[in-house]
Image (cartoon, rainbow, N blue to C red):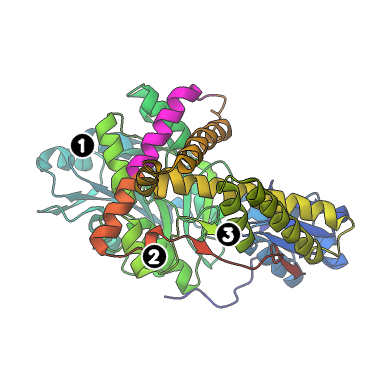
Amino acid sequence: MKPPASTPLPAGFTIRLDRRTRCLDGGTALLGGSPGRLLFLAPAARRLLTEDVLVVRDAGGAALARRLLDADLANPVPDRLPGPPTPAEVTVVVPVRDRPEGLRRLLAAVTGVASVIVVDDGSRDPGGCREVAGSAGATLLRHRMPKGPAAARNTGLALAATDFVAFLDSDVVPEPGWLIPLLAHLSDSTVALVAPRIVGLSLAIHPSWLTRYEGLRSALDLGPDAAPVRPRSRVAYVPSAALVVRRTAVGWGFAEDMPVAEDVELGLRLHAAGWRMRYEPAVRVAHEHRAELVDWWARKAFYGTGAAPLAVTHPGSVPPAVLAPWTAAACLLVAWQRPRALLAATGVTALATFRLRRTVGRLRHPGRVAMWLAGRGLLGAAGQCAALLTRHWWPLTVLACLVSRRVRRAALVAALAEGVIDWSTHRPEPDQPGLDPLRYLLAHRLDDLGYGAGLWWGALRRRTPAPLLPMITGRPGRWPKRHDC
């Protein structure tokens, strides 16, 4: 089902500029978003923003709020969104297999909803899950043989009688009050899916350096900043460990032929149909990460195998890197490690900066902004190229290192520099234990080796190079996109 066409945001809907949005020229222009945008505001639009906050009161405010949200320049304020659904309008669906204690822990944290449906996906000992579900007053459905978590969720979805469904895996525990802020986003009738932040639970159960790393760098944790969910953006997917969906939007549910990445596929399908999705990190759901090294590494490889079917089903949706032509050229020239190549990379960057200056020419200090944009673009591209060497293409990197001293130097610099920068950008929160750089770097490189191994195995099995090919997009001097409002 497609979303309602051109539905305005309701009166009282409140948004706040994203913390990374830069206000330029006294608030006459906004720069930010993913992908980047430069938005020039007319005087009437500027008057609607009060201390970076906009409250929808009329059609003009609703149109501006929608533009800022879609441009990833602002985010909804969950406790100031009018007319949200209530928990009593939500069915919770829990897929489970042989995890009765985890199920007990989860069901104890889920209260106030219309109903809870537990789907036992072929447990070897069904009695444990049956007892836990019965004592919690949940409805229990059972697959005689395991069909996978996607099929288990779909079984529960088909039985749900409410307009909204929350999916929770049996290895998560939502924090108190988790559901109301997520439901607030669904007061916008064009939003099909909302996801919380997934944080670590394992430190309390399995304290180790590996669970510390997962607490800082889990693939399920998408960070502390709210964002729209859409392909090739800062938040390109959300995990199905915890989701709230609009039942009419998701239709038949998850792709049952995908044992992994079925959550990413659902998001791609909703995006293609025109629905909006939101990531709300103010809500936290704790996940019991894997604590054993072999099991943890195998899971990383398993995640990597999901890229190939996604690349085949949704072409261009999951490239390993997205680069502008000039940043790709500059990075290649730097990697060549020759003085003339470095000089050429400087020339390419200078030309791109000049063209960017033309794009932002209406600003008071276009040269300064263009240099900042060029530097940001180059650093981002360098990070993606380092990830290609150490994560997505590491089998090729290893082979090339055997015959090329230049590649060995590039791989060493990439592995160390990217790892240290990644460690510095994933600092622990005040109540969270950290991890020293050495063990973090070791875990990070093992993480990359696991994902990359799964990525190549999936590509070979599907006989497609699609998930290994970076995307070259845009034209020099055309970033960011420029709009008037």
- At label 3, which amino acid type do we have? Gly
Dot 3: element: loop
- Left or right, residue 362 beside residue 102: right
Measure the C-alpha gap from mark 2 to mark 1: 27 Å
Quick one: label 2, few (<14), some, or many (20+) residues within 10 Å? many
- Residue 434 shows in the view: no
SS at badge 1: helix
Taking the image as shown, residue 420 lies to the left or right of residue 206, namely right
Left or right: where 36 falls relative to 265 = right
The disc, 2 or 1, on the residue closer to the chain's N-terminal end is: 1
On screen, residue 194 above or below 410: below
Residue that numbered label 3 is attached to: 83
Quadrant assignment, res 461: bottom left
For the residues marked 1 and 3, what is the alpha-carbon distance in whole angstroms? 37 Å
For image coordinates 39% across by 69% down, the residue present is 314
Query: Residue 25: x percent and y percent?
Result: 87, 55
Query: On the image, numbered disc 1 is attached to which residue?
Result: 100
Residue at image position (74%, 67%) is: 482
Q: Which residue is mark 2?
A: 247
Across and down, in percent, residue 370 comes to 78, 56
Residue 349 disc label: none
The residue sitting at 86% across, 60% down in the picture is 363
Residue occupying the point 43% across, 34% down:
444
Q: Earlier in the sequence, mark 3 or mark 2?
A: 3
Q: Which residues are magenta?
A: 431-450
Task: Give the mark, 1 or 3, whose residue is nearer the N terminus.
Answer: 3
